[in-house]
Amino acid sequence: AREQVIPAAVLERRRIWQALARRDVPRVSRQQQQALRDLLHNSRRVAQACQAKVKLRVKECSRRAVQATHRAKRIAREVLQGAPAPKPAASTKRTTVSARDACPHEPFFFFSQDRRRGDDETAERGRQRAALTTSLLALEA
């Protein structure tokens, strides 16, 4: 059989590529593995923080539920005894809570709380601006 003659340039190029592969492939592989480990570590930390927030919120909700039942029983007992009904809180204005803001198990519940706080501040600024405008118009008239 006839042997195939490989030019020197091809052999040199092959040798250079083998050296690069021997040096760079393990390094890049380690970098990718480290990036994946960092991603998983950060994901775990975020998941644990979210879990702690949800547990705290559930605990708070259950505490309020228990307080509500105690309060309802006390009010019923007072009504049956003929005591005057308790006065409502100073603010009788009820705020509607969207389903997204009301559910602590929804993934973005805590972000929606921050958003709602910003919306409340914006609404308050609007109310103050309207009151100021009304008082200025009354002064002009």
Image (spheres, rainbow, N blue to C red):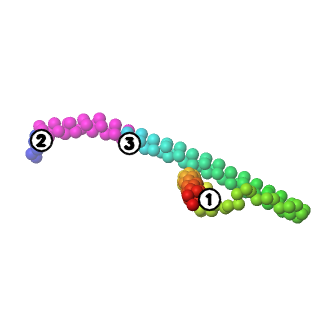
- Looking at numbered disc 2 in the image, what kind of residue is underneath it? Ile
Relative depth, front residue between 93 and 140? 140
What residue is shown at x 38% (from left), y 42% (from top)? 32
- Which residue in the protein does label 3 denote? 32
Q: Residue 121: give x, y in percent of width and height.
A: 57, 52
How far is disc 1 from disc 3 in space, using C-alphas? 41 Å
State the extent of the magenta-drawn residues as a range: 8-30
Q: Position of residue 42 (x, y in %)?
A: 49, 43
Residue at x-position 17% and y-position 39%: 13
Q: Mark 1: which secondary structure? A: helix
Q: Note whether residue 123 is visible.
A: no
Q: Nearer the viewer, residue 131 or 99?
A: 131
Residue drawn at 61 percent across, 55 percent down: 104
Q: Name the residue beneath numbered marker 1.
A: 102
The first of marks 1 and 3 along the sequence is 3
Label 2, secondary structure: give it: loop
User: Closest to the observer: 104 or 19?
Assistant: 104
Residue farthest along the front direction in this orientation: 141
Please, what is the three-letter code of the amino acid marked with disc 3?
Answer: Gln
Q: Quadrant of residue 29?
A: top left
* SS label for mark 3: helix
Quadrant in the picture for residue 131: bottom right
Q: Which mark identifies residue 6? A: 2
Marks 3/2: CA–CA distance: 36 Å
Chief secondary structure of the magenta portion? helix
Q: Is residue 132 magenta?
A: no
